[in-house]
């Protein structure tokens, strides 16, 4: 098994803990012993072991020697003491000979110091293996550490003609059960979920995780929620969006899921605060302009002013289509 394949196992391990580790990064590690045995692990929930220690411990439990081993890890091993001791020290103490790293950790407490610790101990270090895939997998964490703000995912659902509710206000359910379950997975991966006060008054959502594994996110309402609303307890915010993102980022919100209505979506998009847009398209058509649109408020004034980006993925979710769009970076990003 070569380094690329070993890193592939680390990537797979990281996927399994995506909804469990935040605000710590969801990291995977894979260890290959001198005699070719392979052990993989992923970061545990906060306070638990990091991926490197999980993989090292798995090898020890199996009676395998870690001396001279190669370890592939998706993110640079930490070099500071937090809830757990430094992983770089654990690798040195285990006697590994090579460490293959996907991406450098931009956290100011790490940012190359983990690599330096390994090299000073005589361990061969290689970086950049499958770095594009890993940067995509860890995008919310990397964004938070670089900007101090959460990665903002705007979730929307509509008919094929871009409408979200009937003229009488009814909107449940436009998408199918599979798409709604996928939204619960997004919630489980997010540290906070946000809606506007209008959505709270109209739909009285719980905004909890019910159809996926993981914890329910912190709930945020733009404006004031009625005292009897099911969204409580929540953070009610009357200030600006930029200030909210700074506030949430400082409180270790790595990913914010925005599920607000058309007005909230428009505010986030016009302010260029969104890093990822996920749209679920249902096989249905309202067939008129009096149904509610995906986004409300002033549009881009010209074709030249459109905010463009790239389609990261398109996939079938039950009877619906899920489109993952990444807007080009803007001033609010």
Image (tube, rainbow, N blue to C red):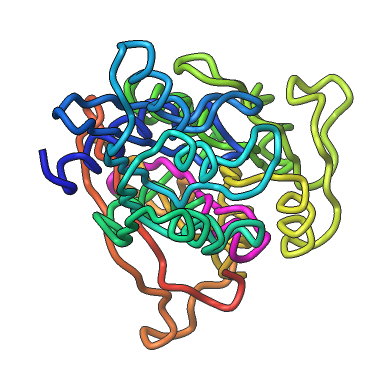
- The answer to whether residue 146 is magenta is yes
The outermost residue toward the right is 227
- Taking depth in this image into account, of 84 and 195 the one nearest to the observer is 84
Quadrant of the frame with the N terminus: top left
Magenta part of the chain: 141-160
The image shows residue 240, relative to residue 226, as above or below, that is below
- Give x and y (percent) for residue 123: 37, 53
- Give x and y (percent) for residue 219: 71, 33
Residue under the image location 52 percent in, 32 percent down? 50
- Give x and y (percent) for residue 111: 56, 63
Residue under the image location 77 percent in, 46 percent down? 251
Asked whether residue 316 is in view, the answer is: yes
Quadrant of the frame with the C terminus: bottom right
- Taking depth in this image into account, of 308 and 188 the one nearest to the observer is 188
- The answer to whether residue 58 is magenta is no
The outermost residue toward the left is 1
- Give x and y (percent) for residue 258: 58, 45
Q: Quadrant of residue 193?
A: top right
Residue under the image location 46 percent in, 15 percent down? 211
Asked whether residue 285 is in view, the answer is: no
- Taking depth in this image into account, of 297 and 314 the one nearest to the observer is 314
Q: Is residue 250 left or right of residue 282?
A: right
Q: Is residue 1 left or right of residue 203?
A: left
Residue under the image location 82 percent in, 38 percent down? 235
Q: Quadrant of residue 320?
A: top left
The image shows residue 300, relative to residue 197, as above or below, that is below
The image shows residue 100, relative to residue 82, as above or below, that is below
Figure disc tally: 0
């Amino acid at each position: 098994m070569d380094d690329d394949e070993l890193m592939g196992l680390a990537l797979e391990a990281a996927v399994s803990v995506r909804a469990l580790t935040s605000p710590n990064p969801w990291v995977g590690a894979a260890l290959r012993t001198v005699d070719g045995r392979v052990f993989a692990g992923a970061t545990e929930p906060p306070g638990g072991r990091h991926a490197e220690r999980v993989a090292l411990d798995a090898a020890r439990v199996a009676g395998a020697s870690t001396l001279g081993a190669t370890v592939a890890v998706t993110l640079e091993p930490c070099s500071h003491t937090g809830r757990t001791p430094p992983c770089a020290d654990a690798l040195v103490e285990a006697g590994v000979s090579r460490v293959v790293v996907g991406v450098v950790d931009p956290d100011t407490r790490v940012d190359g110091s983990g690599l330096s610790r390994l090299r000073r101990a005589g361990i061969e270090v290689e970086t950049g293996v499958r770095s594009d895939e890993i940067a995509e997998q860890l995008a919310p964490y990397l964004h938070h550490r670089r900007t101090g703000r959460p990665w903002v995912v705007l979730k929307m659902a509509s008919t094929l003609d871009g409408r979200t509710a009937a003229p009488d206000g009814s909107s449940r359910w436009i998408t199918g059960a599979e798409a709604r379950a996928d939204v619960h997975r997004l919630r489980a991966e997010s540290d906070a979920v946000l809606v506007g006060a209008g959505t709270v008054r109209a739909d009285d959502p719980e905004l909890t995780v019910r159809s996926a594994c993981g914890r329910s996110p912190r709930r945020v309402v733009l404006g004031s929620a009625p005292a009897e609303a099911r969204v409580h307890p929540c953070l009610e915010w009357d200030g600006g969006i930029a200030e909210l993102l700074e506030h949430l980022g400082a409180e270790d919100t790595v990913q914010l899921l925005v599920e607000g209505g058309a007005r909230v979506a428009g505010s986030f998009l016009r302010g260029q605060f969104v890093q990822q847009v996920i749209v679920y398209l249902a096989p249905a058509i309202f067939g008129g302009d009096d149904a509610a649109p995906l986004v409300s408020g002033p549009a881009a004034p010209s074709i030249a002013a459109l905010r463009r980006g790239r389609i990261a993925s398109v996939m079938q979710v039950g009877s619906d289509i899920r489109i993952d769009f990444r807007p080009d970076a803007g001033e609010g990003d």
